[in-house]
Image: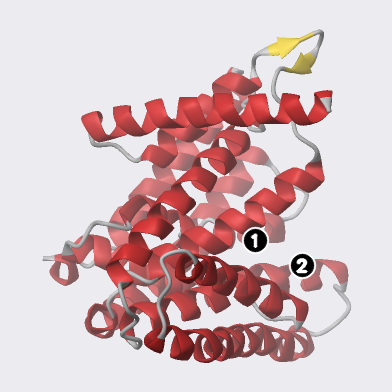
Amino acid sequence: MEQALLYISYIGIILLLGLLCSIISRKLKIPNLLLLILVGMGIGYITYQGKPIIQFSPLFLTSLAIITLAMVVFDSSSKFNFKRFDTLSASALKLSLIFLTLNIIVLSALTYYLFKPASLLLAVMFAAVVSGTDHPSILMILGKAHSKLFELLKVESIINTPLTVLIPFLLIDIIKDAAGSTLSIISSQILPFTQQFVAGIGMGVLISLLFFRFMKKYYSQVLSPLALITVALLTYLGAEIIGGNGVLAVTTAGLMFGNLYHVKHKKKLQQFEDIFSQVFEILVFVLIGSMIKIPWTADFLMPASLLFLGYLMLRFLSIDRKSVV
């Protein structure tokens, strides 16, 4: 009982801090996500008897993270416009390919020079991973922004996912099995990679057909919002169980809900999603921040700053100015 009360106290404190962060972020017009992580980092440095003042069990954190991921991605993608995606997809693909190529060539060399990893392939893997823009985070930060530039970033976060997921896995297999040919390694990854995306999209379509057809005809002030939560969680878990990509599955379901189905009182349901996802967003990102420990030494900060500046320069060089005007 004491442990349960302690967890409830932690949650209450985090939500209070998150509420204050939301107010400040709106006043300053900066991403709420950034403030939540900074608050979490501050909490992480507060200890009592050598232990963090706020700590949860790993199982609780994992479960909370999955629920948050499913809800936030569904909420944000349900507000995404298909027409905007069609017009910007070519520009987003071009941006993704140019940025990935520059990172693999330049950023990997800079990483290898500054941090001296055990292998150049590890530096290339790092460069490929940071080439991706995380889809859930982009949707959280830019969910309500509708300028052409912000819409391009949203589309890019979807398109660059296959590239930034496939390349690191290929490099991991190359490192593990240096004796094998690159061609055989690539061919061995094609089937699992394809399965992730086909199963993810398929699960999103299947769950959407089962639930949203029914919701088109019937509406309940209590049950309809509950149905949306169920759709988000079942879609994510179903895709992961059959070997698919859970984020892609929830994104598919959200897109179908927002663009293909005229569900009764859709705006009311989306308002409920906003509130529900906001609560979990606060909890997860404050807790993520509390686990970030930056070594405040010149040996780390100097090369890290140079690497970040190089990353920003490559990002700037990748942008086609005409596509965002």
Q: Are marks 1 and 2 in contact (CB under 8 Å)?
A: yes
Does residue 263 lie above or below 146 as drawn? below
Mark 1 Cα within 10 Å, few/some/many (few <14, many 20+)? many
Quadrant of the drawing holding the C terminus: bottom left
Quadrant where the N terminus is found in the figure: top right
Q: Name the residue that disc number 1 marks.
A: 125
Please report the residue visible at 18 percent of the width from the left and 71 percent of the height from the top.
323
Closest to the observer: 216 or 201? 216
The dot on residue 67 is none
Answer with left or right where residue 227 lies relative to residue 146.
right
Q: From this viewpoint, is residue 293 visible?
A: no
Instruction: Identify the residue shown where x is 42% and y is 64%.
Output: 75
In the rendered image, the vertical position of residue 219 relative to residue 217, given as above or below:
above
Foreground: 201 or 256? Answer: 256
**Frontmost residue, 176 versus 282:** 282
Does residue 152 show up? Answer: yes
Q: Amino acid at mark 2?
A: Ile
Q: Badge 2: few (under 14), some or many (20 or more) residues near its Cα, within 10 Å?
A: some
Q: Position of residue 249 (x, y in %)?
A: 56, 78
Hey, which residue is sitting farthest top in the picture?
Answer: 49
Q: Is residue 233 above or below residue 50?
A: below
Give x and y (percent) for residue 24: 31, 27
Q: Residue at x 26, y 57 (%)?
A: 144
Secondary structure of the residue carrying numbered label 2: helix
Measured Cα–Cα span from mark 1 to mark 2:
8 Å
Instruction: Identify residue for label 2.
Output: 172
Q: Earlier in the sequence, mark 1 or mark 2?
A: 1
156 relative position to 100: left or right: left
The kind of residue on which mark 1 rests is: Met
Residue 283: x, y in percent?
57, 39
Q: Picture quarter containing residue 255?
A: bottom left
